[in-house]
Amino acid sequence: MKNITFMHSCNGIRFSEVVDILKTVGMRYHPVEMEEKAFNNSSCVVFAFDGNRLIGFARAISDGVYQAALYDMAVHPDYQGKGIGKTIVERVKEKLSGFNIVLYASPGKEDFYRRLGFSKMLTGMALFQDAVAKKEKGFIE
């Protein structure tokens, strides 16, 4: 991770690259303008770069007092398994120190978050706009 740098601002981010990474890793994505608005409206953002190449990111929303939710955590497949995702999440956790942080992991990624201190919720509930797709992908019963 010699050339890997991290940024905590949306300044200069090309959100078409955010969409490209979300597509590449198989996560849900929205039009570029919506992704840009979502990241800009978030209370915490972390972007990872290899030189000038965007390789990963995450964002969190928060009430600013004690609750937060982590969203859109993704690392380009060429860079997975190198500690970049862990560093991104640790930076979010640091920024939101003292907050409860919830997230929903992509099916099969739960162990990644367990290793970072997250626990599986037994009472979590969700109301998704695309519930059929979420059920097919294993997010809900």
Image (cartoon, rainbow, N blue to C red):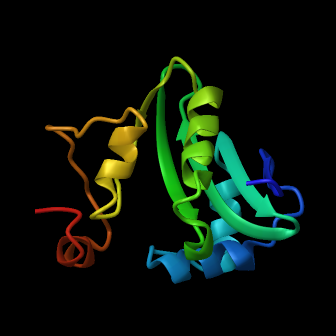
Q: Which of these two is toward me, 43 or 77?
A: 77
Image location (x, y in percent) of residue 86: 54, 46
Q: Is residue 5 visible?
A: yes
Image location (x, y in percent) of residue 137: 24, 75
Identify which residue is drawn at 15% across, 38% down: 123
Q: Is residue 103 visible?
A: no
Q: Say which quarter of the image contains residue 19.
A: bottom right
Identify which residue is drawn at 44% across, 79% down: 26
Q: Say which quarter of the image contains residue 116.
A: top left
Image location (x, y in percent) of residue 75: 58, 65
Identify which residue is drawn at 64% across, 58% down: 57
Q: Say which quarter of the image contains residue 118.
A: top left
Image quarter hosting the C terminus:
bottom left
Image quarter hosting the N terminus:
bottom right
Residue with the most extreme front position: 2
In this picture, is 106 found above or below 116?
below
In this picture, is 128 found above or below 60?
below
Q: Which of these two is toward me, 17 or 53?
A: 53
Image location (x, y in percent) of residue 111: 31, 50
Q: Which of these two is toward me, 95 or 66?
A: 95
In this picture, is 139 found above or below 116?
below
Q: Which of these two is toward me, 99 or 26?
A: 26
Identify which residue is drawn at 25% across, 53% down: 126
Residue with the most extreme left position: 141
In this picture, is 97 found above or below 3?
above
Q: How many marks?
A: 0
Q: Is residue 112 left or right of residue 30?
A: left
Q: Is residue 105 left or right of residue 50?
A: left
